[in-house]
Image: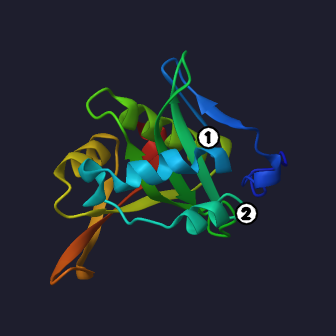
Amino acid sequence: MRDTQENARPMKSNLDSIIAQSEHIRLRLTTEADLDYVLALEQDQENASFIFRWSREQHRRSLFDENLAHLLIEANPENKKVGFILLAGLNDDNHCFALQRIVVAEKGKGYGRQALQLIKQLVFETWKGHRLWLDVKEHNARARHLYGSEGFVVEGTWRECLRVGETFESLVIMSILSHEYSAE
């Protein structure tokens, strides 16, 4: 990565396999060998109603997309796979990153919170981002609570924007800005 703040945005060719780590988890680049795990997580009944599912080909293409970071969450020290993340905006001129997806296999163990904290650290400290935003299904109270407790602010709701079967669902838009992150 270049050392100027203006050009501190990541480029995939400059990213190491391990992107970030804490005492309990690490984030690493997803590989094609990980895609069976990723697809199984998306298909899992506990996750399926909260996320947009992609085909294997969509996930495979994202591994090579210069604007996306497809990351696997692993528990330390055993390197056990516990989830994955899709983060967009690596090349965004406005320094805005979008957390497109975070899926955790084992709920209630803190993996999602720790992964979110590492993502915020990457976006704001390492990559000098200005804004990190996401959308979350309105009925996903657990995720909305987590995001709120991690400093994300509700910006609004895209009302009934998703057709799911014969009904429509709404998305809540949430974000955190760099100065809000710095004040945490």
Residue 67: image location, x then y, percent: 67, 64
Question: Can you say which quadrant of the picture contains the C terminus?
Answer: top left
Of the pair 153 and 55, the residue shown nearer to us? 55
Residue located at (43% from left, 60% from top): 133
Residue located at (54% from left, 17% from top): 78
Quarter where residue 53 is shown = bottom left
Classed neighbour count for the residue bearing mark 2: other residues with Cα under 10 Å, few (<14), some (14–19), many (≥20): some
Residue located at (20% from left, 46% from top): 142
Residue located at (39% from left, 55% from top): 42
Q: Is mark 2 on a helix, strand or loop?
A: loop
Of the pair 37 and 147, the residue shown nearer to us? 37
Above or below 152: residue 97:
below
Tag in front: 1 or 2: 2
147 to the left or right of 116: left
Residue 86: image location, x then y, percent: 52, 55
63 to the left or right of 181: right
Residue 102: image location, x then y, percent: 42, 50
Residue at which label 1 appears: 125
Residue 9: image location, x then y, percent: 72, 55
Q: Which is nearer the N-term, disc 1 or disc 2? A: 2
Above or below 12: residue 135:
below
91 to the left or right of 173: right
Above or below 126: residue 66:
below
* Three-letter amino acid code of the residue under disc 2: Glu
* Three-letter amino acid code of the residue under disc 1: Glu
**Which numbered dot is residue 156?**
none
Quarter where residue 58 is shown = bottom right
Q: What element carries label 1?
A: helix
Classed neighbour count for the residue bearing mark 1: other residues with Cα under 10 Å, few (<14), some (14–19), many (≥20): some
Give the spatial CA distance, label 1 vs label 2: 20 Å
Is residue 177 among what the camera can see? no
Residue at which label 2 appears: 66
